[in-house]
Image (spheres, helix red, strand yellow):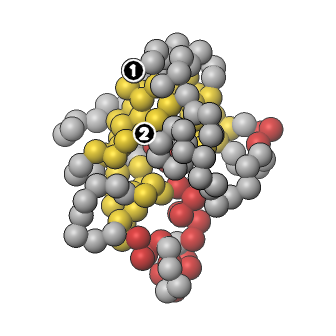
């Protein structure tokens, strides 16, 4: 995809019940199964710059909360910082959306369960909606 458009069916809002500064992506309209919610460009960052023991990686530690494992073959190991609202979707083991990495440098979010207006949109950070592998942060 060479062109990206701002999303019109979703918005980002803060949720004070989840802690200071918590944000999520919410539906403005009903979203049906199979609908593409958003396709966003990504910035590819060498994985060693975010995860590792170097001063560079230690200084970038907080950005690690917002990056995706990049599952598209490349010559180096990368992580992807999604633009648009892409890095603000929250995790659930029972998600209503999924994401997929698209070569060379974008991520598509699509609906896998009906989403009502006002409902938060969740993805499974493990990549596959039914993957129950523990994530590396405490769940609320």
- Which residue carries the number 2 mark? 99
Q: Secondary structure at mark 1?
A: loop
Q: How many marks?
A: 2
Write down the quadrant of residue 18 in the picture.
Answer: top right
Q: Nearer the viewer, residue 4 or 136?
A: 136
Disc 2 to disc 1, C-alpha distance: 12 Å
- In x, y percent, where is residue 4? 28, 35
Q: Position of residue 110 (x, y in %)?
A: 42, 29
Question: Residue 35: which disc?
Answer: 1
Q: Quadrant of residue 130?
A: top right
* Residue plotted at (56% across, 19% down): 115
Residue 85 visible here: no
Q: Circle 2 sits in a helix, a strand or a loop, which is it?
A: strand
Residue 65 seen in this snapshot: yes
**Nearest to the observer: residue 89 or residue 137:** 137
Q: Position of residue 95 (x, y in %)?
A: 58, 33
Residue 36 location, quadrant: top left
Say above or below: 101 vs 71. Answer: above
Residue at (46%, 15%) from the top-left corner? 32
Q: Earlier in the sequence, mark 2 or mark 1?
A: 1
Horizontally, residue 16 falls left or right of residue 11, namely right
Name the quadrant of the N terminus: top left
Disc assigned to residue 68: none
Q: Residues within 10 Å of mark 1 (few under 14, many from 20)?
A: some
């Amino acid at each position: 995809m060479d062109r990206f458009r701002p999303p019109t069916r979703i918005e980002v809002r803060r949720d004070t019940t989840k802690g200071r500064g918590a944000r999520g992506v919410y539906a403005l309209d009903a979203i049906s199964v199979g609908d593409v919610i958003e396709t966003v460009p990504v910035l590819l960052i060498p994985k060693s710059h975010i995860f590792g023991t170097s001063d560079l990686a230690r200084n970038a530690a907080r950005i690690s909360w917002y990056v995706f494992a990049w599952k598209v073959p490349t010559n180096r190991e990368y992580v992807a910082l999604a633009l648009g609202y892409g890095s603000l979707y929250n995790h659930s083991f029972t998600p209503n959306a999924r994401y997929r990495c698209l070569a060379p440098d974008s991520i598509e979010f699509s609906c896998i369960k009906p989403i009502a207006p006002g409902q938060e949109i969740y993805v499974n950070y493990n990549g596959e909606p039914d993957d129950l592998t523990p994530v590396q942060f405490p769940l609320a």
